[in-house]
Image: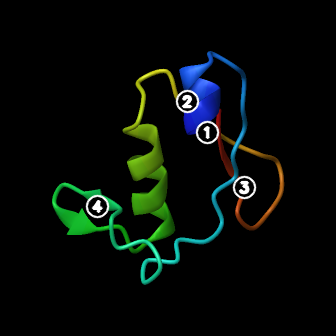
Amino acid sequence: MTQALAHDKPFAVVPCCVFAHLSPHRTLEGRPVRSIDEFCRYLMAKDPRIKAEFLPFEGRNKVLY
């Protein structure tokens, strides 16, 4: 995603796992990112061009692009 943004290339990401214990550097408002909602907000904070939509199926269906 970071490379796509840097090179102005299209991308789509469906975040599914946070792995907070493996990525303690991920913080949102000074707190560790622990939930999938926080992870999505963390990723979207990287660039104002990132948008979110929901895909038409159950489960992890939020796509960032």
Mark 1 = which residue? 1
Of 56 and 33, which appears nearest the observer? Answer: 33
Going by the numbered disc 3, the residue's amino acid type is Asn
Residue farthest bottom in this picture: 21
Which residue bears the numbered disc 4?
27
Earlier along the polypeptide chain: callout 2 or callout 1? 1
| Residue depicted at x 52% and y 29% | 50
Q: Residues within 10 Å of mark 1 (few under 14, many from 20)?
A: some
Mark 1 / mark 3, whichever is N-terminal: 1
Q: Is residue 15 above or below residue 18?
A: above
Q: Which residue is mark 3?
A: 61
In the picture of the structure, the residue carrying the numbered disc 2 is 51
Q: Nearer the viewer, mark 1 or mark 3?
A: 1
Q: Earlier along the polypeptide chain: callout 4 or callout 1?
A: 1
The answer to the question of whether label 4 and label 3 lie on touching residues, with beta carbons closer than 8 A, is no
Eye-nearest disc, 2 or 4: 4
Tags 2 and 4 in contact by the CB under 8 Å rule? no
- Extreme-right residue of the structure: 57
Residue 52's quadrant in the figure? top right
Of label 2 and label 3, which has the lower sequence position?
Answer: 2
In three-dimensional space, the C-alpha distance between marks 1 and 3, rounded to whole angstroms, equals 17 Å
Q: Is residue 3 positioned above or below 55 on the image?
A: above
Q: Is the residue under label 3 in contact with that under label 2 (CB below 8 Å)?
A: no
Residue 61 percent across, percent down from the top left: 72, 55
Q: Amino acid at mark 1?
A: Met
Query: Is the residue marked by circle 3 packed among few (<14), some (14-19), or many (20+) residues within 10 Å?
Result: some
The total number of labels drawn is 4
Q: Residue at x 54, y 23 (%)?
A: 6
- Identify the mark nearer the N-term, 2 or 4: 4
C-alpha separation, residue under disc 4 versus residue under disc 1: 17 Å
Residue 43 in the image: state x and y as whole percent. Answer: 46, 46
Amino acid type, callout 2: Lys
